[in-house]
Image (cartoon, rainbow, N blue to C red):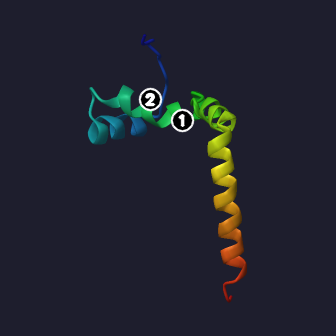
Amino acid sequence: MQKKLTITVDEEVYEGLHKIIGPRKISKFIEGLVRPHVVRSNMDLAYSQMAKDKKRETEALDWAEITFKDIAHEKG
């Protein structure tokens, strides 16, 4: 569902939006800029579900330990 929002911007910003973005594309442009800052992603849920997968967690831990051992033997 979409909601209408009225905002106030400087005239120079308004003209720039119309010229560069286009008059029928401004809402989508602004939403794309704002969305990552105000809409929480499902990343927390995804990480939680991954952590519950014991086989995957064991494989990831094994991989990490092997990788750190390899790094310890590298010459710096």
Q: Nearer the viewer, residue 27 or 7?
A: 27
- Above or below, 52 relative to 7: below
What residue sits 35% from the left and 41% below the top? 16
- Above or below, 75 relative to 1: below
Q: Circle 2 sits on which residue?
A: 31
Residue 49, located in which quarter of the rendered image?
top right
Q: Amino acid at mark 1?
A: Pro
Q: Quadrant of the N terminus?
A: top left
Secondary structure beneath disc 2? helix
As drawn, the residue found furthest toward the bottom would be 75
* Position of residue 18 in the picture relative to residue 34 (left or right): left
Which comes sooner in the sequence, label 1 or label 2? Answer: 2
Q: Amino acid at mark 2?
A: Glu
* Position of residue 27 in the picture relative to residue 55 (left or right): left
Rounded to the nearest angstrom, the CA distance separating label 1 from label 2 is 9 Å
What residue sits 71% from the left and 64% below the top? 65
Secondary structure beneath disc 1? helix
- Tag shown at residue 36: 1
Residue 63, given in percent of the width and then of the height, sits at 64, 60
Residue 66, given in percent of the width and then of the height, sits at 67, 67
